Amino acid sequence: MENIYDYTREELEKIVEDLGEKKFKATQIYNWLYKKKAKSFDEMTDLKKDFINTLKEKFIIGSIKIDKKEEDKDVNKYLFKLHDGEYIEAVLMHHDYGLSICVSSEIGCNMGCKFCESGRRKKVRNLEPGEIVEQILLVEDDVKQRISHVVVMGIGEPFDNYDNIIKFIKIINDPKGLEIGIRHITVSTCGLVFKIDSFARDAGGANLAISLHAANDELRSSLMPINKVYKINDIMNAVKRYIDKTGRRVTFEYIMLDSVNDSLEDAEDLSKLLKGMNCYVNLIPYNETENIGYKRSNMFKIMKFYDILKKNNINVTIRREFGSKISAACGQLRSKKEDK
């Protein structure tokens, strides 16, 4: 049977009509799923019994479950078990503006970034839209609070699962669904240039983030194999087209790796690369893992890096440190499970 969370409301309207019902029934179903958080079709009391039975024959409501949770101050890390026995992760972060969740888009990842725990595990398959949606629903149910911000930056390269990510955005942004504001949805890519133009057209105004982590091709290629295919200049040109088309500011993520990409020269190079762009830089203290040798930059180096960017009029923030006492690094909790 099919997971009903896989469908946009427009798709469900067509399905409902094909089943001989009025398409407004799809909105009723969406209301039960996303507003009232129904766990079974039998809870949908404003639908006819025979229609409920038809739905039960065709659909399931959800296919994943929480396998493990770790908690630290202001952060929860979740490990989910999927219907095929695979595992993915999500991280919930508590901010002063509300709850933000970082969700996974694939089981494993083929990008092979050297500093990323997920890169140690090759891609098994794409996640279906409903499997991404369910990460939000299950965490909301666990904490009994509404999640207001979503980042697609967990396990996987989102643009390598592009069509399902676009459908996921439509589902969670739908005013009859989870109603998460489009400006509160961010998708991060390591640089699949050919999809950036598509994202500008298809994403409805969702935010774009680029996992950059280096300002020159030699260093970036040593950290991120994708850079051997799409050079930094290719990415910058695509980002400029995105900004011209959407008017949206782009985020550049920069993980601070001790004695690798955190020198004053690196900061100057990054400033020159981004000069004049409608963007900001998010400096990310690295979450170390036992399987990868990289170390995090100390706060003195991070602050010096920050100061140089500021001096060069680059908008920059230092991401609050989350989850250093738990398995918060991307893919870390899954790796612990599968390494046993």
Image: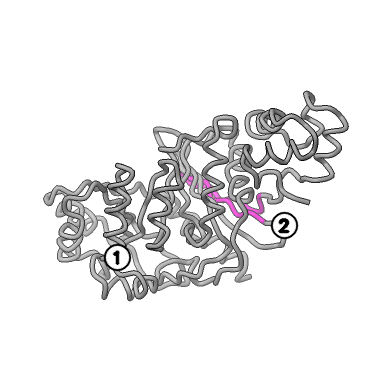
Q: CA distance from mark 2 to mark 1?
A: 39 Å
The disc placed on residue 56 is none
**207 sits to left or right of 9:** left
Q: Amino acid at mark 1?
A: Asp
Would you place residue 70 above or below residue 123 in this image?
above
Q: Which residues are magenta?
A: 66-81
Visual colour scheme:
one colour
**65 sits to left or right of 220:** right
Residue nearer the viewer, 318 or 135: 135
Q: Nearer the viewer, mark 2 or mark 1?
A: 1
Disc 2 on helix, strand or loop?
A: loop
Q: Is residue 59 magenta?
A: no
Q: Which residue is mark 2?
A: 83
The disc placed on residue 234 is 1
Task: Report the residue at 63% width, 48% height from top.
Answer: 130
Residue nearer the viewer, 241 or 174: 241
Residue 218 location, x and y as percent?
Answer: 26, 75
